[in-house]
């Protein structure tokens, strides 16, 4: 009576079972060799097929009708869907029909069903004999998420929507206050000599010596501000040694960038386009900041980045071109969790406040974050849960949400052949869209299964190859749509790509690769379609541009550009919504790049496509220009990212006291390790060494065989021999923070220390943690504070 689970298509990709089992072990469930019965497995979206062969060692007699090990092996096909880094166990089944005894070799055909509003996974299974005879059918097998390593931790979070709010900033502590850091010279960098002189004078008045570094191109037109800055930084390093902080004055002349049709040229002499402004600021500021951090980051200086007109705290205009510097600030916050980095966005319509006032405000923020001043009022940015105070996005029952569609119109999805693009295409069709135009730089030779399915449903789907950052190619797409398709009524701009590089090492080519589809592509789309009657213009941005991501400055700048572009369009009365997606599971760039486990370790869990798009649907069409959608465990995020100073943008979400400095219970590090570190340090060091090897292998993407080959000598190895680069170094440090709350200095990780010495250092930190935790229980709050600080 049950509908059979359909066969996946012959093109279904095969997954490597050893990797699946290893990944599942890493998230908490280790199947021993006798129980690893999935020999081969193929998965296509919500369907999978597994060939199962129960090993001899696990076949304890053939007297069963329903051999428990064979049945358990069928349940293991769940692992093929476990790409969100979440451990799940079976908790119930709706129906089980058995037609014949299960032999040790079977084929299991599996279909995943969607579950509303929970992190549960529901599977239907058909168990077949090797000759295709149906032996058993399992319907509604429910798996529930279990929290990782901490039995009573919060359950896996579900997707929620977030929005940035600007609130009045805390009052400055008064003119007598000293800047946040007073030891060592401060460096003041910028193009405006008068401003540099004013800053120096005001710092000197507070007893803080400052060195001005003039970074504008010289009169000979040699445009290498980064080169000039690098030389100056090295000089200061040689002659002064200590540096307390950096004030970076990015250009304050906001009259230059104009909203023109052109991709890169300004409308009038002396002006530059929004795109050119974005690229110039991104290139030069990243280079100057990178040079500064390379020279001085180890001294833990404070960083204040002054921008002008990059934010819209009071709903006024903001320059999308300048907004890239917001993304760059988030990159520094993520990559240097031990520093304080503040963006201060000055009022483009008023003279800049005195340097002393800016410094006082930055100090009063007491952590990293974003300040803006408009009309003499100071604001501070906070990311808020938009659904916590319902109805944050008031929406009438049955209202279309931010994607209102109608039949007889065309919907353009750039990046439409990627993971998010295809899911959005399906959702638009579900809402009634009957013509879809999917654009990517390449069109796959084989029609994607999702496109074939849409066509079967009668939806007209066209796929076109075009680079959206290429004006001619984009114009060709739009001309084709105009000539041959129904009127364009909605755009989802999902074209995007990443480029891995840390701020210190990012070069312009890589930054530009990540920025082109989102900065130039989005701007061209905006300009070329602004006269059309569009129902929506959705820009796919990233939650990471708000939380910060390591190793992605270009990508973060590209996304903050999209966020600002959406606000810019709204001020022009045009539809726009920038959606900062958290990680998607199943498909898309996070899943494709194997990053879901890294994200989950930081508390950012993968969202199924339906979950993500349902959350988007909860946002009203008129409500807001920029939302983020993510499934985030903020407590874990706070403890795992290791931000030593509060990150004020996230202060309303990350529970107080979850930073590493306040951590005393050893939540991320397994509690047994903490105990072991105190009672039997040698054993603990051995256990940490084993886990360190796992983490190193995961970060470097080693196979199981490569990892095992390394095991016997790992204790003596120095990690710098193993092929780490700056990006994988940051990932390793973050994983150590997340898993052990251990802060291992980078120079120890990659300089002097062998893997065993690193493990011993981690163990010492673990046992210190347990002492603090024990003290925590014995003392009242006031004393505890003293102890844990
Ligand atoms: N998936 C996630 O977890 C996640 C999280 C946060 C944000 N996002 C954002 O969501 C959007 C879609 O991401 P996704 O996960 O679907 O990534 P994806 O699977 O890699 O798809 C992105 C698509 O964009 C296309 N593309 C890249 N550059 C292009 C260009 N210049 N012109 C035209 N097409 C271009 C790519 O195809 P070609 O290479 O063939 O051009 C690719 O198919 C991206 O903007 C991404 O930043 C995704």
Image: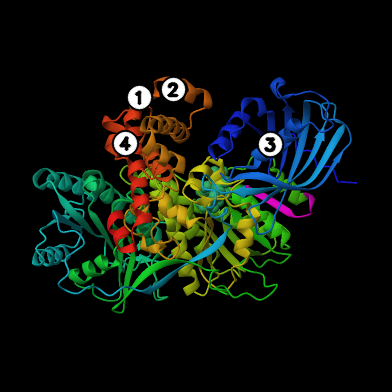
Residue 106 x/y as whole percent? 78, 29
Q: Nearer the viewer, residue 553 or 257?
A: 553
User: Looking at the image, do the residues carrying marks 1 and 2 touch, with CB atoms under 8 Å apart?
Assistant: yes
* First of labels 4, 1 by sequence position: 1
Residue 68 x/y as whole percent? 76, 33
Residue 646 x/y as whole percent? 34, 59
Residue at mark 3 to residue at mark 2: CA–CA distance: 29 Å
Disc 4 crowd, CA 10 A, few/some/many (<14, 14-19, 20+): some
Check disc 1 and report the residue beneath it. Answer: 717
Residue 464 in magenta? yes
Disc 3 crowd, CA 10 A, few/some/many (<14, 14-19, 20+): many
Q: Which mark is residue 76?
A: 3
* First of labels 1, 3 by sequence position: 3
* First of labels 4, 3 by sequence position: 3
* First of labels 3, 2 by sequence position: 3
Check disc 2 and report the residue beneath it. Answer: 710
User: Looking at the image, do the residues carrying marks 3 and 2 touch, with CB atoms under 8 Å apart?
Assistant: no
- Helix, strand or loop under label 4: helix
- Helix, strand or loop under label 2: helix
Point out the image quarter for the C terminus.
Answer: bottom left
């Amino acid at each position: 009576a049950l509908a059979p689970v359909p066969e996946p298509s012959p093109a279904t990709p095969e997954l490597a079972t050893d990797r699946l089992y290893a990944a599942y072990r890493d998230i908490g469930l280790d199947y021993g060799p006798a129980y690893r019965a999935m020999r081969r497995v193929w998965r296509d979206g919500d369907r999978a097929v597994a060939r199962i062969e129960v090993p001899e060692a696990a076949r304890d007699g053939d007297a069963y009708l329903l051999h428990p090990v064979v049945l358990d092996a069928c349940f293991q096909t769940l692992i093929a869907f476990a790409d969100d880094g979440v451990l799940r166990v079976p908790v119930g089944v709706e129906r089980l029909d058995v037609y014949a005894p299960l032999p040790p070799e079977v084929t299991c055909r599996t279909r995943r069903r969607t579950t509303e509003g929970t992190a549960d996974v529901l599977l239907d299974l058909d168990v077949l004999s090797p000759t295709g005879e149906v032996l058993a059918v399992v319907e509604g097998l429910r798996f529930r998420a279990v929290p990782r390593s901490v039995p009573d931790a919060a359950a896996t979070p579900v997707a929620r929507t977030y929005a940035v709010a600007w609130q009045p900033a805390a009052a400055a502590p008064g003119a007598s206050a000293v800047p946040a850091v007073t030891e060592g010279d401060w460096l003041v960098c910028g193009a405006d000599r008068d401003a540099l002189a004013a800053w120096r004078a005001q710092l000197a008045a507070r007893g803080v010596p400052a060195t001005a570094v003039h970074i504008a191109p010289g009169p000979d037109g040699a445009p290498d501000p980064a080169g000039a800055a690098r030389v100056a930084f090295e000089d200061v390093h040689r002659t002064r040694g200590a540096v307390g902080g950096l004030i970076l004055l990015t250009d304050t002349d906001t009259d230059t960038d104009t909203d023109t049709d052109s991709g890169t040229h300004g409308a009038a002499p002396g002006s530059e386009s929004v795109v050119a402004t974005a690229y110039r600021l991104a290139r030069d500021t990243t280079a100057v900041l990178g040079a500064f951090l390379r020279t001085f980051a180890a001294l833990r200086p404070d960083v204040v980045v002054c921008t002008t007109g990059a934010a819209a705290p009071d709903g006024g205009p903001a320059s999308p071109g300048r907004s890239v510097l917001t993304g760059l600030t988030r990159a520094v916050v993520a990559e240097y969790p031990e520093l304080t980095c503040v963006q201060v966005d000055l009022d483009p319509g008023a003279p800049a406040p005195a340097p002393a006032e800016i410094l006082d405000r930055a100090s009063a923020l007491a952590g990293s974050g974003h300040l803006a001043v408009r009309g003499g009022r100071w604001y501070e940015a906070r990311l808020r849960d938009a659904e916590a105070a319902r109805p944050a996005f008031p929406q009438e029952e049955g209202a279309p949400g931010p994607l209102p569609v109608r039949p007889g119109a065309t919907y353009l999805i750039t990046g439409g052949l990627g993971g998010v693009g295809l899911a959005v295409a399906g959702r638009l069709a579900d809402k009634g869209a009957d013509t879809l135009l999917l654009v990517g730089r390449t069109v796959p030779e084989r029609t994607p299964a999702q496109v074939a399915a849409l066509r079967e449903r009668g939806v007209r789907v066209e796929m076109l190859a075009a680079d959206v950052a290429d004006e001619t190619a984009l114009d060709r797409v739009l001309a084709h749509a105009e000539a041959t398709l129904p009127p364009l009524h909605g755009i989802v701009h999902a074209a995007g790509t990443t480029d891995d590089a840390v701020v210190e090492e990012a070069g312009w080519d890589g930054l530009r690769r990540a920025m082109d589809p989102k900065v130039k592509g989005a701007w061209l789309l905006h300009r070329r379609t602004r006269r059309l009657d569009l129902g929506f213009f959705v820009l796919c941005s990233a939650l990471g541009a708000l939380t910060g991501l390591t190793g992605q400055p270009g990508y973060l700048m590209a996304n903050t550009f999209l966020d600002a572009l959406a606000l810019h369009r709204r001020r022009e009365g045009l539809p726009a919504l920038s959606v900062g997606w958290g990680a998607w599971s199943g498909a898309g760039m996070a899943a494709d790049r194997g990053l879901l486990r890294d994200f989950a370790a930081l508390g950012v869990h993968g969202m199924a496509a339906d979950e993500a798009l349902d959350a988007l649907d909860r946002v009203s069409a008129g409500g807001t220009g920029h939302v983020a959608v993510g499934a985030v465990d903020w407590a874990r995020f706070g403890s795992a990212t290791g931000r030593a100073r509060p990150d004020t943008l996230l202060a309303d979400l990350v529970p107080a006291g979850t930073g590493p400095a306040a951590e005393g219970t050893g939540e991320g590090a397994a509690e047994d390790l903490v105990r072991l570190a105190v009672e039997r340090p040698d054993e603990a060091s051995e256990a940490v060494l084993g886990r360190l090897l796992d983490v190193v292998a995961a970060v470097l993407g080693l196979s199981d065989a490569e990892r095992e080959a390394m095991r016997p000598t790992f204790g003596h190895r120095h990690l710098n021999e193993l092929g780490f680069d700056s990006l994988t170094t940051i990932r390793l440090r973050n994983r150590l923070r997340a898993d052990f709350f251990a802060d291992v200095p980078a120079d120890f990780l990659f300089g002097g220390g062998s893997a065993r010495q690193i493990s011993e250092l981690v163990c010492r930190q673990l046992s210190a943690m347990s002492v603090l935790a024990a003290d925590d229980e014995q003392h009242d709050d006031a004393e505890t504070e003293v102890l844990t600080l």
